[in-house]
Structure formats: structure tokens, C-alpha cells
Amino acid sequence: MIINTGGRTDTVQYYTKWLLKRFEEGYVYARNPLFPNKVTRYELTPDKVDGVQFCSKNYEPILTELPKITERFHTYFHYTITAYGKDIEPGVPSIEKSTETLKRLSAIVGKQRLAWRYDPVLLTEKYTIQTHMDTFESMVKKLTPYVDRCIFSFVELYKKLETNMPEIIPFTNREKDTLAKALGEIAAKYRLHIQTCGTNGDYTKYGIHPSGCMTLEIMGNANKIVFRDLKHKGMRQGCHCIESRDIGAYDTCMNGCKYCYANKRPEKAFENYQYHDPDSPLLLGHLNETDIVQQGAQKSFLAADSFQGQLKLNL
């Protein structure tokens, strides 16, 4: 199975101590977001976890301690750096600072394990198509030598965006096509592999590869291991990634990004943070008397040869 550390919250940036302790102690509890009294236990040991997928907008807090995880587990890292400033992403470092952190991360884990996410792409009066073109090319020049690929997606207009981000301007299909063409041309110019994430559009004619930002092929190639030939069911509509298990919790990310799907409202994450205990197996709070804890299914995706090699490595 694949463990996901960043789908519901920026665990790396705000819960670093907790994350490191979970891997040190070898297990974690994850509360079901739909049925809060149901808690799943996952073993965080190399014989139970095929790979760990990281996703963050700021890896600086974990850089010095990261080898404690990368030396034991197969890993892949997604680093989100967009064109936006504090007006849209209040808790996210500047492009310049993020770029320097990405370079340091690449030096630790290797460029083959690191993807740059330029998403979601959205429009406002300030962040125009031309702004995206200019910013994207500037960033590609600096980041291409340090990353495996670039992943982008157009923003999904969730209902809550009407309240959280009323300034957003919906894309027309023509605008999406214009911008995708430009991004594809820029990526080709600097020989950067670019692909979509969960978008329904087909932009392959612009040299943009289809979605599937965490496939077994990507994880396998990055770590020189072989997985079984399995269908990638995806995590949501339009997604072509392999299934993973997220150990985070919604309404806990304090980046405050206006477009965020994982927070009902930005203030909620700060309110919830008071319940965080770095020593608890749960990201928020502790087990309650009414909680039902079940062992999570952790079936390996590895091919037989890779699995045997993994076992020998951990002996």
C-alpha cells in the first residue's frame, strides 16, 4: 500500500514532529472523516508500506530529519509552488524561498523522486493568463534541473469558493486551451516533462502528458522497484493515481489557501490546532471511549521479486 501524508493537510509544514514520531513508533491512527468514531490503524513499517507519498508547500521544517524516513522507505515528493502571493496563499513562503528549499530537498532525495506541482491554476484580475505564462517560464528556468516533472491542473470550482474566493474568474474552454498550449511550449523549450492532474481536458497535442501524478510506474521508476500490473482506480473523479491511504485530517491546514478543498473555512484549521498533540497517534486529539479502532488492510502492490528484495533489505 501507499501512504499519503499531504492530501488532507500540509502535514510536513505544520505537523513535522508528529509525522516523524509516527514513523519512529511504526504506526498511526486515521479518523474516518465521514464516520468520526471509526478509526483505522496503519502500520508504518517497511514491510507493510510500499511507498510514502509526500505533498507540501514548505519542506523546510523537515529537511534535516527527512533521512530518518527516506533511508527506510521508498518515497516520492510533490512540492507545490504556484504564482500566487499572500493574498491567496497566506501561510505559504515566497516563490524565491520555496525555490531554494526545493533545491535543498532535491539534493537530499534526488530529482527522480521530486515533482513540482503548479496547481491549481486559476484566474483573477491580478493573476491573468499572461501572468501565469510569465511566472511559469521564470520558475521553469530555475526548477527544471532539480525535478522529475511538472504537474498542473485547472482549479475545480467547489461550491465553497463562492464564499472563500469570490474574486475567482471561471475559465472558458478557449482560455484553458490557450494557457495549456503556452505551458506545453515552455516546458518543451526547457525539456521539462509536464502532465495534468485530474483534469478532464486532453492537451496531449501540446506535449502535455495525461494525468496520473502518483502511479506505480512513477513510484517504481523513482525507487528502482517493480510493482504488479494493477489498475489505477484513482482517488476521485478524473484521477488516475494509485489508491493511497491518507493519514492526515481535514480542517487542519493553516496555509489558509483560499482555493483549498480540504478546509471548510481558513479559521477552522487554527481552531482545531489546539487539539493537536505531537505524541498522539491521531493528528487531532486522542481516542475516545466510543471510538472503534480497526486494523487497515495493507496489501502490497509490489511484484514478487521486488517484495523479496524489500524483505532482505529490512533484515
Image (cartoon, rainbow, N blue to C red):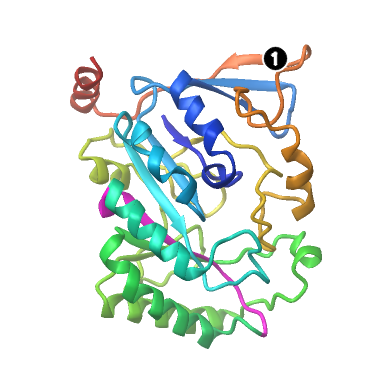
Asked if residue 210 shows in the view, the reply is: no
Which quarter of the image is occupied by the N terminus?
A: top left
Q: Residue 184 is drawn in which quadrant?
A: bottom left
Question: Which residue is painted at 71% across and 50% down in the image?
Answer: 263
**Residue at (34, 59) in percent of width and height:** 103
Residue at figure coordinates x 21%, y 28% from the top left? 306
Is the residue 314 above or below the residue 66 in the image?
Answer: above
* 201 part of magenta stretch: no
**Residue found at the very far front of the displayed protein:** 64
The residue most toward the top is: 289
Query: Where 180 sits versus 98, above or below?
Result: below
Estimate the x, y position of residue 109 in percent, counting from the top left: 30, 46
Query: In the image, residue 292 lies at what x, y percent?
Result: 70, 14
What's the amino acid at mark 1?
Ile
Along the viewing direction, whichever of 93 and 33 lies nearer the viewer: 93
Within 10 Å of disc 1 (Cα), the crowding (few <14, some 14-19, many 20+) is few
* Residue extent of the magenta highlight: 110-125
Residue 123 appears in the picture as rendered: yes
User: Relative to residue 83, is residue 125 depicted above or below?
Assistant: below
Q: Image quarter for residue 39?
A: top right
- The image position of residue 29, as x and y in percent, is 59, 23
Task: Determine which residue is flagged by label 1.
Answer: 292
Q: Is residue 123 magenta?
A: yes
Q: Secondary structure at mark 1?
A: strand
